[in-house]
Image (tube, rainbow, N blue to C red):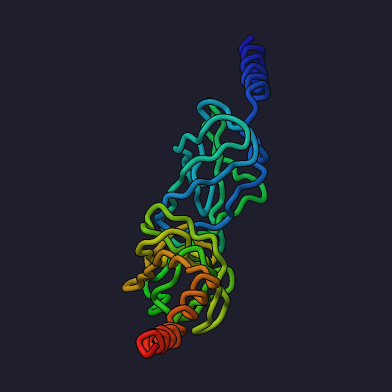
Amino acid sequence: MKLFVSLFVTFAISSSTFVNAQTSNTTITAISPTSVTTNTATSIILTGTVAANDLLIWATDCSNAIPNVDPNDGTNKATVYTVTGLYNYGWYKLCYRKAGESDSVEQTGIKLTVVAATAANTITAISPAEITSASATSITLTGTVAANDSLIWAPNCSSAIPNVDPTDGTNKSTSYTVTGAGTYKLCYRKAGGSDSVEQTGITLTVVAATKKTDSSKKDALSMGVQSLPSLLSFVIAFCAIILFI
């Protein structure tokens, strides 16, 4: 009888485990972006369906990780994450736990690269420092631009998203069009990052375009002024003739 009870309990536990399947390793199949800046809040889209009360964590090893972040529920949704620390020997893995489970399952093929913050002195000077609004102008950046670095001219870098790819190399020029008079900061992002860092001491003054004068009117006015002496001489001569008569 004891043997029968033991077998029955074992079968019941096994059946329960089978019904309550563990977390799948393909719940999330892709992420975007795949590279972020350390200690910078970044919106990451998870390709897949997140159910209510599912949890996750970004870690170097899922076997020791405890998922404790509740991502936004739904299909292909974005959630803001802040991953702190650099992992120089690989990538951060996405460790996932479905609602009601106690496991931590690495999602197959998901790798998140975390890079150091962008330096505030990548660019140390610009020339020229004043341009006309809505007019394409070549500006030289003093410093070294690496491949896939990006920038944007903005009044405030904290809310700006660098999306302009400048010419790679040292002290190179790129044509920029900035619309709207005012003072702009140079917001820079190194390749693979997700931050937006104001470059120290760099300001770009944008002035309104000057109103052009109609060239035909200008020429006519010029010709009129130039003919005044001749007209005056004619009037004097005419008056002299009248007086003589």
Q: Residue at x 49, y 80 (%)?
A: 223
Q: Position of residue 224 (x, y in %)?
A: 47, 78
Q: Position of residue 203 (x, y in %)?
A: 35, 70
> Is residue 184 left or right of 58 when viewed as pictured?
left
* Residue 153 higher or lower than 20, as above or below: below
Instruction: Report the front residue among 128 and 25.
Output: 128
Q: Position of residue 86 (x, y in %)?
A: 45, 62
Instruction: Report the front residue among 169 and 209.
Output: 209
Q: Quadrant of the C terminus?
A: bottom left
Instruction: Report the front residue among 209 and 101.
Output: 209
Instruction: Report the front residue among 229 and 156.
Output: 229
Quadrant hosting residue 73: top right
Q: Residue at x 58, y 52 (%)?
A: 33
* Residue 160 higher or lower than 106, as above or below: below
Q: Quadrant of the N terminus?
A: top right
> Is residue 84 left or right of 29 when viewed as pictured?
left
Count of numbered circles on the image: 0
Q: Position of residue 12 (x, y in %)?
A: 64, 16
- Furthest residue in direction top, as rendered: 1
